[in-house]
Image (cartoon, rainbow, N blue to C red):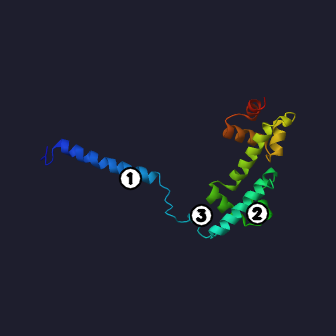
Amino acid sequence: MGIKIVPNNVLQSFTSLLVVPIFYLAYKEMNSTHDFGITPRKYRTSHISEEKSKEYLANIEAAMKDDKLYLQKSLTLKTFSQYVDINPKYISQIINQNLHMSFSEYVFKFRFDEVKKRLADSNNKNLTIFGIAQESGFKSSSRFNYLFKTHAGLTPKEFQKLHLK
């Protein structure tokens, strides 16, 4: 059987004391961002000053909000970059770092808000839902329906009925 140097109850207490910090460290490790103030590897070669980044972000947001470029069904990162005269790599980096989304997610956000606004507008009752979606920049009916249901939790028709009274 062997020689017992430490009684079982002391050994169990000691083990319990070790388990708590180990679980705490594991939890912290799993939930840390590991950025330590360092630019992610993805943008290591792309050096944009904080001032330039803010300027570019203002130009990007103005093009979307004021000029409503998101309404263009054929909008791509390349065509958008030509419009705002900013390198596509910088546009992607700025949106990703500042808004925590991709360019396509950014465009979708504007289109989604636009389509919800139009679906809730009684002046658009006579338009088809896909017609409203097309006017809001969506190209595909099936993709639009899928994304709408995913983000709104309702079909476009259910959303429209709920908001048009």
Residue at figure coordinates x 67%, y 39% from the top left: 150
Residue 153 image point, x, y percent: 67, 35
User: Which amino acid type is shown beneath numbered disc 3?
Assistant: Lys
Q: Give the vertical position of 84 relative to 30 (above or below).
A: below
Name the amino acid type tagged 1.
Answer: Leu
Q: Residue at x 29, y 49 (%)?
A: 18
* Closer to the camera in the image, 72 or 5: 72
Q: Which mark is residue 81?
A: 2
Name the residue type under label 2: Ser
Q: Regarding mark 3 in the picture, which secondary structure is present there?
A: helix
Q: Single out the mark in the foreground, 2 or 3.
A: 2
Instruction: State the mark number for residue 42.
Output: 3
Residue at the disc numbered 1? 25
* Badge 2: residue crowd in 10 Å (few <14, some 14–19, many ≥20): some
Residue depicted at 70% across the width and 42% down the height? 147
Q: Is residue 82 left or right of residue 89?
A: right
Reading the chain from its start, which is encountered first: label 3 or label 1? Answer: 1
